[in-house]
Image (spheres, rainbow, N blue to C red):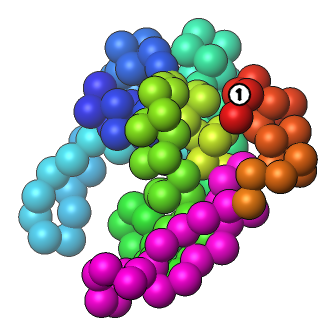
Amino acid sequence: MRLAQKRGYANAECYAQVFARHAVVVEKASGNRGWFAPSTPAYNAELRRRCGVDRLADLAARKPARIAGRNTYAGPQTQGGAYLAGTKIAAQRGYSGDKVACFARVFAEHATFRPSPIRTGFVDWSANLGPTITGEMQNQCGISI
């Protein structure tokens, strides 16, 4: 449930039920145990069919972060950093579930960054709200901005 909520899925309870059916306990190198659901075709199809969650698209959007060697999202100047910024902006605008992930993907494709004038070592993300991004938000996400 926490994982679904963290990722912004609209139907977190449905995600949790499907996850529970497919998950196994794994022991990490540190000795800690945790739950893991392997990315099998059956798992991904059930999430899509029952919960409306396109897990593969979500994983693809977060892939640059994993390549950078991070557990969740990559550093601020990467595509993963833009995706994270997009999720925050979407949440601030009141979107939830799949709309958050879609908003973040489109935002990350068009985002640029500059050094933050307020916080040393951080960047500020922005995207020009021109016809291209507004059209993509409408067509891909059903969001009018």
Residue 7 vs residue 32, the one in the foreground: 7
Q: Is residue 120 magenta?
A: yes
Residue position marked by numbered label 1 in the rendering: 143
Q: Position of residue 2 (x, y in %)?
A: 26, 33
Q: Which residues are magenta?
A: 106-127
Depicted 70 relative to depicted 142: above or below? below
Depicted 89 relative to depicted 85: above or below? above
Q: For residue 22, say whether it is visible.
A: no
Residue sitting at x 66%, y 73%: 112
The N terminus: image quadrant: top left
The C terminus: image quadrant: top right
How crowded pointer 1 is (Cα within 10 Å; few <14, some 14-19, many 20+) is rated as some
**Relative side of 38 to 121, left or right:** right
Q: For residue 105, say whether it is visible.
A: yes
Residue sitting at x 58%, y 28%: 98
The amino acid sitting under disc 1 is Ile
Q: Position of residue 41 (x, y in %)?
A: 67, 34
Residue sitting at x 11%, y 58%: 32
Q: Position of residue 3 (x, y in %)?
A: 33, 37
Q: Residue furthest left?
A: 31
Residue sitting at x 68%, y 61%: 127
